Amino acid sequence: MFVWLDNLARIIVENVFKLSMETKLGSSIHFFIYDTIKIIILLGIMIFFISYIRSYFPPEKTKKYISKFRGVTKNIIASLLGIVTPFCSCSSVPLFIGFVEAGIPLGVTFSFLITSPIINEAAVAILLASESFGWKVVVIYVITGVVVGVIGGVIIDKLKLTKEVEEYVYQMHMGESEIKEMTRKERIDFAVQNVKDIVGRVWKFVIVGIAIGAAIHGWAPEEILSQYAGPDNPLAVIFATIIAVPLYSNALGTIPIAEALLMKGVGLGTAMSFMMATTALSLPEMILLRKVIKPKLIAAFVVITSIGIILVGYLFNAISHLII
């Protein structure tokens, strides 16, 4: 798909930088040029199409749509909507309050909150762009992300932790906002603006992540990484998830690093667990959620989601030979 880009990167390395592709520096520069252009192109395309779909699901409509269902179906719908609905740590508090005010069960709310940051169009675009991951990994990534959200939400509901929500949240009345139907042109304009906004905000993460990935690609000791973080090390997935939980990073910066590590022999499940935990359990999100929920509920959220991500990591390791 990107043969032309591979050739272009080779020409730049050999004719502009006067380096051989056989050298570590030449290989790293090729990795950086190739991945940067490829990811930016696919990122723009994917954000446009997902944003167009997203225009049909503003937060107010999302709340009303979820409230129509019953039982576990609510958790499933909430997780599926989390894929195409805008969510990041900066919007966690107002969305949480809106869901609680709408009478949506706490477990259903958490199904949405777990899935939405894990599965986003940017991460999907980069995974699709990577020869190391590919569409099979993306499909399983999306399915397992939804499953973690659904099961996590159901468990939180069974734990009966509604008292762990700050009392003032139940007393708030945010009011109903008018749901304006958009024309096709408005949806296209919305999608284009989202591409500009998101790419404008995340390109630095992409560049830094690719630069680190390029360094790993050229210089990281393959034997050591394969030994300690390979699929045969049963503790690698757990360790990767634990160290990712307190980190403040971005999936866009993490995936190129995960790709480089994967090429060096790190297990697929280890790389995926690190990426998912960094995205779903960032420290800023926990700080913001503390404004509306108490430490006991935050702890339950972190533990349940972490266990789910670890299990997903082991699944990826177990089937990696079938999908990459």
Image: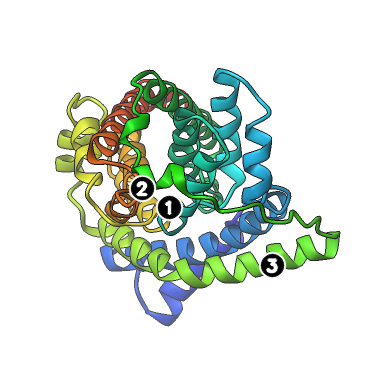
Tell me the quarter of the picture where residue 158 sits.
Answer: top left
Q: Label 2: which residue?
A: 292
**Among numbered discs 3 and 1, the one appearing first in the sequence:** 1
Crowd tier of the residue under label 2, counting other residues whose Cα lies within 10 Å: few below 14, some 14–19, many 20 or above: many
Q: Residue at x 28, y 68 (%)?
A: 25
Q: Label 3: which residue?
A: 192
Measure how far apart labels 3 and 1 are at the Cα level.
26 Å
Tell me the quarter of the picture where residue 152 sits.
Answer: top left
Q: Label 1: which residue?
A: 93
> Is residue 14 visible to us here?
yes
24 to 108, vertically: above or below: below
Is 308 on the left-hand or right-hand side of 72?
Answer: left
* Badge 3 amino acid: Val
Q: Residue at x 48, y 26 (%)?
A: 150
> Is residue 132 visible to us here?
no
Q: Residue at x 47, y 56 (%)?
A: 91
Q: Secondary structure at mark 3?
A: helix
Percent position of residue 95, x then y: 50, 49
Crowd tier of the residue under label 3, counting other residues whose Cα lies within 10 Å: few below 14, some 14–19, many 20 or above: some
Pointer 1 with pointer 2, Cβ within 8 A = yes
